[in-house]
Amino acid sequence: MSGDNKVAPIIIKRKKVSGGDGHHGGAWKVAYADFVTAMMAFFLLMWLLNATTEKQRKGIADYFSPTVALARVSGGGDGPLGGESVFAENVLPRMGTGSTSLRPTADKKEKGSFSQGEETEKDSQDEIFQQAEDMLMGRGGESMVADELLKHIFTEVTDEGLVIELFGSRSAPLFDEREQPTQLLRDLSLVLVRASELVTNPIAIEGHTVSYPVVLANNPKWDVSGQRADSFRQLMFGNGLPEQRVDRVTAHADREPKVSNRMDPRNNRLEIVFLRHSADME
């Protein structure tokens, strides 16, 4: 009987399953998600750099590194300053008998007023000029100027306004031997009339020439630069520019060379300036 009770023991084998090893786990998904997020941020950054102006990029940078702001209103406190900040517009230090008015009168301007409005207006015009310049030169995408014309144009935003410089070369001058506009200049005048539609500012046209040999008895540089500027004015009128848009036509002769060699053809140029709007004009 005792032999019959010797039953074989039952052995239960438990298999341990681990689910985080190698590619069977989920850790790689987290790393991949971080990689995709970083790449998306990178492409967004590249897009912003290409699609924004220098002023807009500066604004974005200032947003992420803010400084003490110029507040015009009270903070509502009851301290020694009555809730005002030392940087508030109402408590800014006055210089002499000036003021801190954002729109000072002419009398206050003469007395040394602090005019934030003028700075704001200047910044606004700079942004408009920058957009017109980018559209003209194709910096934000497709240019409104053909490639063969684009190499004869130089633009720059200055204190005077948006300066668009047209210049020729030995092989492609702006005027022929009879001082008549070449086809190159006629095509450029069409471009400038189209560009003038992007802004409403008054226009100045300025003529520049190379230096002539000193042995000439009658140096024609002043007459030539004036005639060229006026000839281009007539071209723009003929292409549809309203006459009231032109504020002045100026001859500079060879007094403001673009390159040091005053006889270099690069100094033969026309400058079209979209002048800034003054406060008096507004």
Image (cartoon, rainbow, N blue to C red):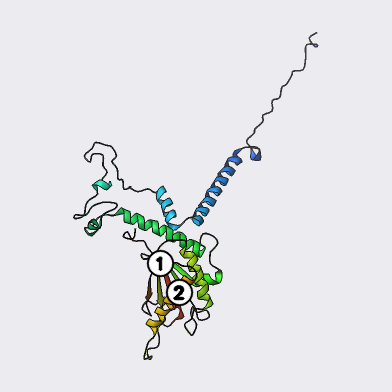
Q: Is residue 260 visible?
A: no
| Residue at position x 48%, y 64% in the image | 195
Residue at the spot of label 1: 244
From the viewer's perspective, tell me whether residue 189 is left or right of residue 274: right
Task: Point out the residue furthest to the top here.
Answer: 1
> As shown in the figure, which amino acid type bears the numbered disc 2?
Gln
Mark drawn on residue 234: 2
Above or below residue 272? Residue 105 is: above
From the top left corner, tell me how far across and down residue 150 is, in percent. 52, 69
Position of residue 257 measured from the top left corner of the image (x, y, whole percent): 39, 77
Residue beneath the point at 48% across and 55% down: 52
Neighbor class of circle 1 (other Cα within 10 Å; few <14, some 14-19, many 20+) is few
Q: Viewer-proximal residue, 119 or 33?
A: 119
**For the point 40% across and 86% down, which residue is it?**
212
- Which comes sooner in the sequence, label 2 or label 1? 2
Left or right side of 94 for 147:
right
Task: Give the residue furthest to the left.
Answer: 96
Q: CA distance from mark 2 to mark 1?
A: 13 Å
Q: Quadrant of residue 148?
A: bottom right
Regarding mark 1 in the picture, which secondary structure is present there?
helix
Q: Dot 2: what SS?
A: helix
